[in-house]
Image (cartoon, grey):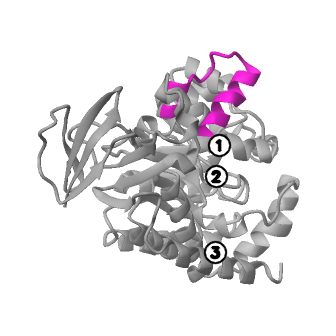
Amino acid sequence: MSILIKNVLLEGKERNIYIEGNLIEAISEDKSSKEAEFVIDGKDKAAIPGLFNAHTHAAMTLLRGYADDMLLQEWLETKIWPTEARMTEDDVYWGTKLACLEMIKSGTIFFNDMYWHLRGSARAVAESGIRAALSAVFIDGFDEGTAKEQIRRNRALYEESKKQDERIIFALGPHAIYTVSKESLCWVRDFAKKHDLLVHIHLSETKEEVEDCIKRYGLRPVEFLDGIEFLGPRTIACHCVHLSIKERELLKRHDVKIVHNPVSNMKLAAGRMPYEELKKVGLYPNIALGTDGCASNNNLDIFEEMKIASLFHKAFTSPTSMPANESFELATLNAAKMFRLNSGVIEEGKLADVVLLDLKKVEFVPNHNLISNIVYSANGSCVDTVICDGKILMEGRKVEGEEEIKDKAKEVAYELVKHG
């Protein structure tokens, strides 16, 4: 399939973007352009790379607004975990379908997910047309029998993943050091190394996690993982809020990738990730943005995440902290590199993951600086068109089948919490 986007604003100039298959084949200012099967009028629109959501639990869209304004442990133990225990693969399928719809509507073409019933998530992603790194929740509760079952399940899911849509990356998802035994973490380390897999883990999200790790192992979380040789360039460490100077240096030494989730961290009072301090040790290119799940955010809008991340750090450090261009890169180029994808920027030879913004939206008037407007003014509703892997997933803000997805997800969600 070929797509021609005509006269679209790209890097300050009107250009034509020609897509062949799933790649951007040509970018030019030449008005006499190639013919294509699909032609999109780019007038009054700006082209940006599709956005990345580097940490979420997609099917938690079903729990949006269900349990808010609660203490973290009470929230987990009395609301979230009991409800998740009732979820079926079909529930997760519809919750993930809803998440994919929400992400498409707000310009996100990739998400990194950790959730139950991975097969349901994979089916939803394959149908949606966007990209994802999917990992099953690996929790053994320090029980040897449960650990063996988790290992068996992940081996089977890895084998199944070889037949999945090429837009899906299989990853391992050990939940956290306080829910997964040392022995299982070592298995994850070895299996990931053998098969070159990404490892998606929550790390140093709360003070309690740090204190529990010191009690259990006599070490802080990053120090403990360093001691078992768990850390490496394939490690996707989410949150990283409570870090010592030594831990920041260890993360840099091992080229660990970090996902910042400012909205979720604020809502659950987890604390502030030391962004400027991580930059000082050279970790900036390794940091991306995530929303976390909709039970703790409560949306999947990366535009909102970019703005709040920037303002959050300015409030605690300086007005120059996380300028707009950096925040934008956390949601595009940095994340694309993190997940080893030839995306994150609009250039010839890159994957055709392109988002068109409607410059007629009041949020873009006047347009002194497009990136500033994107980060500080825009929101997901400013997205007009989404192309992922060379296929048009949304045009004129319309996504095929969206009403059915919303209706069915609502039905599933109400049934799920009925007895909660």
Q: Is residue 260 above or below residue 20?
A: above
Location of residue 184 by image quarter: bottom right
Report the residue marked by disc 1. Answer: 261
- The foreground one among 172 and 340 is 340
Q: In the displayed structure, does residue 36 sit left or right of residue 311?
A: left
The reply to whether the C-beta atoms of the residues labelled 2 and 1 are less than 8 Å apart is yes
- Pick whichever of labels 2 and 3 is earlier in the sequence: 3
Q: What kind of residue is marked 3? A: Gly
Picture quarter with the C terminus = bottom right
Q: What kind of residue is marked 1? A: Asn
Which numbered circle lies on residue 321?
Answer: none
- The foreground one among 166 and 236 is 166
**C-alpha distance separating marks 3 and 1:** 33 Å
Q: Residues within 10 Å of mark 3 (few under 14, many from 20)?
A: few
Which residues are the magenta region? 305-328
Report the residue marked by disc 3. Answer: 145
- Pick whichever of labels 2 and 1 is earlier in the sequence: 1
Q: Nearer the viewer, mark 2 or mark 3?
A: 2
Report the residue marked by disc 2. Answer: 292
The reply to whether the C-beta atoms of the residues labelled 2 and 3 are less than 8 Å apart is no
Q: Is residue 313 magenta?
A: yes
Q: What kind of residue is marked 2? A: Asp
Q: In the displayed structure, does residue 69 sit left or right of residue 260?
A: right
**C-alpha distance separating marks 2 and 1:** 6 Å
The reply to whether the C-beta atoms of the residues labelled 3 and 1 are less than 8 Å apart is no
